[in-house]
Amino acid sequence: MPYPNINAVIADLQLIVNHCKINNLRAGYFAALYLRMTQAVKEGIAKGIFEDGPRMEQLDVHFAARYTDAWKCFLAQQPCSPSWQYTFTSSSNTNNIVLQHLLLGINTHINLDLAIAAAAIAPGDKIDDLEKDFNAINSIIAGLFDDVQECLSQVWAPMRFLARVMNGRHEAVLNFSIDKARATSWSNAVLLANMTPDQQSKHIEAMDHLVMKLGKKIEQPGPWAIYLLKLIRKTEFDVPARTIGLIESIVM
């Protein structure tokens, strides 16, 4: 269920981050990034950078609830969407590097949850008015991800090597592009906003399975990329709580 306000979202996300730190869960990597993003959205609303601050808060609480509800279902061993089930299960894969864990969460949250949340708060013709703020929230996610990526490159030398080898095209390594995800998510939001409930249900089911397939590509991007990722993984911190703390406290 949606939260009453963005402060309630931040409080719940902090609980998830703390739980992951205490239990050394790699799922905390995305949780920490998402907490930072939500705090940035709150600051943006206060500064008036969005076209409609109250509407942005409404989008944020619907958006966040998709993630936190799925996480709580997963912890309780109850069914959640296939793509979130895959993402949370993959968080126990110790072969994945930190960026893969982050991208698995970003993939599911942008490609699935954001479109659903947008259509829920702006049905029908209202969806057109949301586009600028919709893009703004994606820009915040992308910006924070870039900050995390740059910081990790400074901490782990092989990460910077990977960046040089791929000339900054990390999407090519991990088969993922935040820009493409944003465009796809907006297209799906427009479609969902103009569908009947029955049509929405069927379309969301199809989206969910496609997102899960993309998650599998993030984990298995190809032989050459896997070789490079293994080099990075050998040098990463083996204490997830430490990495979660790093992501949580990055200032760029």
Image: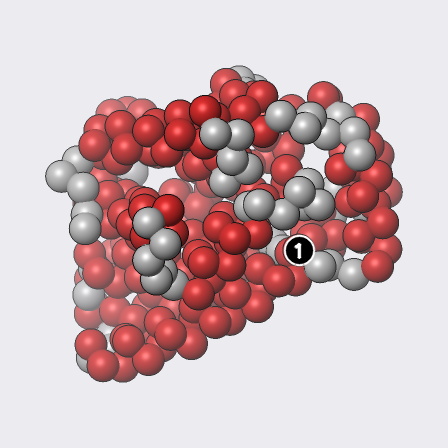
Quick one: label 1, few (<14), some, or many (20+) residues within 10 Å? many
Residue 210 visible here: yes
Q: Horizontal and vertical percent for residue 128?
A: 28, 62
Q: Is residue 221 above or below residue 105?
A: below
Give the side of residue 14 with respect to residue 106, left or right: left
Quadrant of image for the C terminus: top right
Q: Is residue 200 above or below residue 123?
A: below
Q: Which residue is mark 1?
A: 219
Residue appearing at x 33%, y 49% in the figure? 76
225 vs 196, nearest the viewer:
225
Amino acid type indicated by mark 1: Glu
Name which quarter of the figure residue 43 lies in.
top left
Instruction: In this rendered view, identify the residue nearer to me: 104 or 177.
Output: 104
Identify the residue shown where x is 52% and y is 21%: 245
Which residue is at 44% across, 65% downward? 82
Q: Is residue 115 visible?
A: no
Residue 169 x, y percent position in the rendering: 73, 48
Q: Is residue 160 above or below residue 245?
A: below
Please indicate whether residue 92 sits to the left or right of residue 66 in the image: right
Residue drawn 37% across the image and 33% down it: 16
